[in-house]
Image: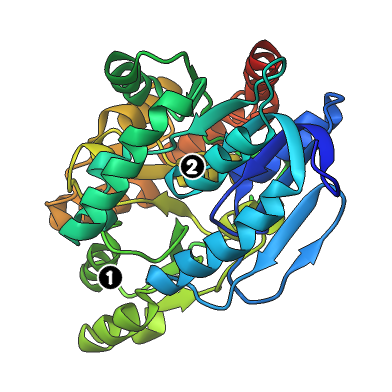
C-alpha cells in the first residue's frame, strides 16, 4: 500500500454533491452500520468542501460543463488515490474513470480490488448526453471501455437490469431509489382553500416542467405548484410563468437537504411528475421522487411509463396519465382533489406503501451484494 494511503473495505466515488445525493449517502450509512469501514468522496459544487473520516466533499467552483469535469478529475482522482479499498463503487458514469484508476493503482496480484458500477440510468439513452453528439460519443466510449474493469452492476429497476445483463453479461443487483424510512410531518388536516401540486428534484430539461406550468394555467386559480429543488431551468420557468400570468402561483424552495425533502413535500396535496418520453432512459425510469411522494403520504400522478405505472397501480396511490394531454391531466387532478373519499384513500395507501418502499427494506440486498463482491 502506498505511503500516506488508508485501507478500508469500500470506497464510494460520485460526481455529485453527497450533501444532496441520497443514494450514495444511504450506501455509506448502511455500510458503516453493518460494520464495514467505508468512505464516500464526492464533489461540492457550491465551492465549499469539508471532510470527516468517512466523507469527503471536494470543493469544485464550477457547476457544470467541461470546467466542472476538469476540476472534478483534477481534485477527486488524487483524493481517491489516498484510499486503498477492497471494493470501489463508481456512483455514476462520470465516476468510472477515477474508480478504475483507483482499482489499477491499489490492486495487487494476491488481492485485486473489486469495482461496482452503479448504473442508475441507461446512460447511452440519456437525453442530456445526446444533446451534444461529441459528448455522447465520448461518454459512450468511456462506458464501453470501462466494462472490462467492472465486477458487478447496481441499477434502479428490473427493466433496466434486464437490458444491462443481456448487454454486459455482468451480475446485476436491483436497488430501487427509495428514501430512508421516516415519518413525515404529515399535514393531515390540510386546507383545500388552496391546493398545491409539488415536484421534487433538479429543475432540468426533459422533466415536463414547462408542462407543469401550462397545467397550472388551465386549472382553477386556487391550484398552485411548489418546486422542491433547484436547477438550470429556474429562470426559464420564471419567465414562462410570467408569460402565462401565473407567477404568483408558482413557488421555489431552492435546494433542500435530503433529510428535509419529505417534510417539504408533505406540505403539498399531490405529487406530480410529467416526465417527457424522450427515449428509453426516461421511459424505463423509476425515479427517487416517486418514492419521496409516497413517503410524504401524497396521492401521485405520473406518466404512462411501465415502471412508474406499475408502482401506482400495485399500491393504488393515484393515477398514470397521458402527459401529452394536459386537459386530461387537469381533469385527473380535479377528480382526485374534488372527491374527499378518493383523496383520503390514495393518501392513506401512500402512507401504507411507505412502510415497504423504503431503504431499510432495500438495505439487506445492498449489504449482501457488497459482502459477496468483497
Quadrant in the picture for the C terminus:
top right
Q: Quadrant of residue 36?
A: top right
Residue drawn at the location 19% of the way across and 49% of the way down: 323
Q: Position of residue 219 (x, y in %)?
A: 26, 66
**Other residues around mark 1 within 10 Å, as few (<14) / some (14–19) / many (≥20):** many
Residue 267 sits above or below residue 295 on the image: below
Could you tell whether 202 is left or right of 191 in the image?
left
Quadrant in the picture for the N terminus:
top right
Residue drawn at the location 59% of the way across and 46% of the way down: 296
Along the viewing direction, whichever of 159 and 242 lies nearer the viewer: 159
Could you tell whether 222 is left or right of 55 in the image?
left
Residue drawn at the location 62% of the way across and 23% of the way down: 362
Distance from label 2 to label 1 (Cα)? Answer: 37 Å
Q: Position of residue 201 (x, y in %)?
A: 47, 58
For the residue labelled by badge 1, is the local secondary structure a helix, a strand or a loop? helix
The residue labelled by disc 1 is: 213
The answer to whether residue 289 is seen in the rendering is: yes
Residue 219 sits above or below residue 289 on the image: below
Q: Position of residue 295 (x, y in %)?
A: 60, 40
Residue 279 sits above or below residue 62 on the image: above
Marks 2 and 1, the one that precedes in the sequence:
2
**Other residues around mark 2 within 10 Å, as few (<14) / some (14–19) / many (≥20):** many
Q: Quadrant of residue 50?
A: bottom right
Along the viewing direction, whichever of 21 and 345 lies nearer the viewer: 21
Along the viewing direction, whichever of 175 and 369 lies nearer the viewer: 369
Q: Are marks 2 and 1 in contact (CB under 8 Å)?
A: no
For the residue labelled by badge 2, is the local secondary structure a helix, a strand or a loop? helix
Q: How is the image coloured?
A: rainbow
Residue drawn at the location 54% of the way across and 60% of the way down: 73
Along the viewing direction, whichever of 1 and 218 lies nearer the viewer: 1
Q: Nearer the viewer's eye, disc 2 or disc 1?
A: 2
The residue labelled by disc 2 is: 96
Amino acid at each position: 500500500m502506498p505511503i500516506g494511503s488508508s485501507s478500508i473495505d469500500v470506497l464510494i466515488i460520485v460526481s455529485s454533491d453527497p450533501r444532496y445525493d441520497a443514494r450514495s449517502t444511504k450506501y455509506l450509512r448502511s455500510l458503516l452500520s453493518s460494520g464495514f469501514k467505508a468512505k464516500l468522496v464526492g464533489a461540492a459544487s457550491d465551492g465549499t468542501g469539508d471532510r470527516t473520516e468517512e466523507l469527503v466533499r471536494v470543493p469544485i467552483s464550477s457547476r457544470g460543463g467541461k470546467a466542472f469535469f476538469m476540476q472534478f478529475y483534477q481534485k477527486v482522482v488524487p483524493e481517491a488515490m489516498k484510499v486503498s479499498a477492497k471494493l470501489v463503487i463508481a456512483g455514476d458514469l462520470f465516476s468510472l474513470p477515477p474508480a478504475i484508476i483507483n482499482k489499477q493503482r491499489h490492486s495487487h496480484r494476491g488481492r485485486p480490488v473489486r469495482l461496482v458500477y452503479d448504473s442508475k440510468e441507461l446512460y447511452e439513452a440519456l437525453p442530456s448526453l445526446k444533446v451534444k453528439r461529441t459528448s455522447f460519443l465520448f461518454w459512450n466510449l468511456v462506458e464501453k471501455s470501462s466494462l472490462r474493469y467492472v465486477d458487478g452492476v447496481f441499477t434502479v429497476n428490473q427493466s433496466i437490469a434486464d437490458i444491462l445483463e443481456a448487454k454486459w453479461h455482468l451480475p446485476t443487483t436491483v436497488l430501487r431509489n427509495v428514501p430512508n424510512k421516516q415519518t413525515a410531518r404529515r399535514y393531515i388536516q390540510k386546507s383545500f382553500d388552496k391546493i398545491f401540486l409539488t415536484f421534487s428534484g433538479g429543475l432540468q430539461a426533459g422533466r415536463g416542467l414547462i408542462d407543469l406550468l401550462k397545467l397550472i394555467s388551465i386549472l382553477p386559480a386556487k391550484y398552485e405548484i411548489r418546486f422542491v429543488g433547484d436547477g438550470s431551468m429556474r429562470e426559464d420557468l420564471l419567465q414562462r410563468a410570467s408569460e402565462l400570468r401565473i407567477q404568483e402561483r408558482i413557488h421555489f424552495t431552492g435546494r433542500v437537504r435530503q433529510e428535509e425533502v419529505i417534510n417539504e413535500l408533505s406540505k403539498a396535496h399531490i405529487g406530480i411528475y410529467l416526465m417527457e418520453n424522450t427515449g428509453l432512459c426516461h421511459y424505463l425510469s423509476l425515479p427517487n421522487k416517486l418514492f419521496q411522494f409516497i413517503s410524504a403520504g401524497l396521492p401521485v400522478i405520473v406518466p404512462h411509463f411501465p415502471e412508474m405505472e406499475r408502482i401506482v397501480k400495485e399500491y393504488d396511490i393515484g393515477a398514470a396519465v397521458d402527459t401529452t394531454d394536459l386537459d386530461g391531466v387537469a381533469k385527473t387532478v380535479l377528480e382526485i382533489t374534488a372527491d374527499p373519499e378518493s383523496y383520503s384513500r390514495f393518501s392513506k395507501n401512500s402512507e401504507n406503501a411507505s412502510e415497504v418502499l423504503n431503504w431499510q427494506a432495500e438495505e439487506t440486498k445492498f449489504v449482501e451484494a457488497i459482502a459477496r463482491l468483497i
